[in-house]
Amino acid sequence: MTIIPSSIHFGIDATKHFVSNLDAVSLTLLTVTLVAFLIPIFILFPPVTVDCSDVLRQTHSRAGEPLRDSNIHRESSPDHRARDSNRSGGEQQQHIFPVHLCRGIELRRDGTSSFSSSECHHLYMFAHQKRDDDLVWKAATCEKFPLLANIEVDLWVHDPNKTSRLLGKVEGSFLVLRFPWTDAGLQGILQRISAKLSHGFNAIPEKEFMLPVSYPNEDEVKLRGYSFAHFEKGDNKVMALNMDVELPTELAQYLGAEKVGIFRLDQQS
């Protein structure tokens, strides 16, 4: 039989005595003291997650705004050119769709920037496999995966006016894709709190992942673990670069797919 040390008995008795002697005023003072102690801790170490966007914001700037209207149809012209419409003062409005079937980006430019929107148009396409032993990936369709329309895409371009001592020099442009996602249980509750603290009361938890705008070179393909695979789009079957290692595991669950990949399209595909 285990013998409880007398010091533990003393601690338990002291705690009971302390609690029994607390009145309303004492409880109020104790609560205020705890809150006053915790507030600086939350300010210095906020309980929020660090997303890809938070990291890129140190060296990059976001180009344009995500299209909120999922009914705006994705451009499918064979030359992959963005749609331009003239606006007052020479400003142009451009809708680009870097990822097939996902939300587009609205760019507003005055025509003086060297940044070419066509370089970020129709870069990626989602694909799926029904079984792990399938050798061919099939292009995702909006009929089979309607939730692709909920995925928002941000374009982040290098900003020469921004520097980060921690990250150093980070060049190139990147796409950040995000979709609604909340885990079950306590983790989901914490995610909701974190989202509201980070982005406002109406914010919902989201999952983010990042993709490069430029085509990966041979060293990057090996380093990141990308692979070439057969990709079937309509009647065409090609060999394309599969970058599914960049996808979070939650994405397949969100879309209701067995296995999801994302293929980098070259400009001639």
Image (cartoon, grey):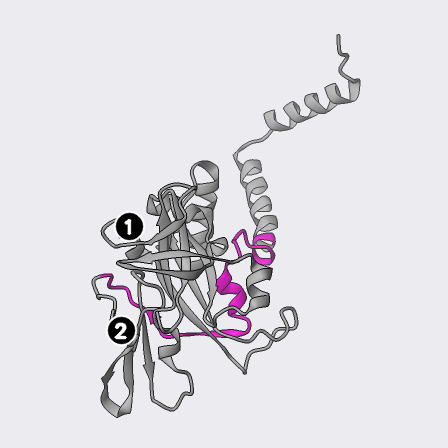
- Cβ–Cβ under 8 Å for marks 1 and 2: no
Q: Is residue 200 visible to the viewer in this orientation of the structure?
A: no
Question: What residue would you read off at disc 2?
Answer: 78
Q: Which mark is residue 37?
A: none
Secondary element at image label 2: loop
Residue 157, horizontal then vertical, whole percent: 47, 76
Closest to the camera, between mark 1 and mark 2, is: 2
Q: Residue at x 35, y 61 (%)?
A: 152
Task: Please name the amino acid that badge 2 sits on.
Answer: Pro
Which residue occupies the extreme top position in the image?
1
Question: What residue would you read off at disc 1?
Answer: 145
Residue 144, horizontal then vertical, whole percent: 26, 49
Note whether 22 is above or below 140 in the view shown. above
Residue 173, horizontal then vertical, whole percent: 48, 73
Task: Please name the amino acid that badge 1 sits on.
Answer: Phe
Instruction: Please state the extent of the stretch shown in magenta in the rendering.
Output: 41-70
**C-alpha gap between disc 1 and disc 2:** 23 Å
Q: Is residue 58 magenta?
A: yes
Residue 26, horizontal then vertical, whole percent: 58, 37
Q: Residue at x 35, y 78 (%)?
A: 118
Give the position of the C terminus as an image quadrant.
bottom left
Note whether 11 is above or below 45 in the view shown. above
Secondary element at image label 1: loop
Sequence order check: which comes first, mark 1 or mark 2?
A: 2
Note whether 148 is above or below 20 in the view shown. below
Give the position of the N terminus as an image quadrant.
top right
Q: Is residue 45 magenta?
A: yes
Query: Along the horizontal axis of the image, is 225 left or right of 100?
Result: right
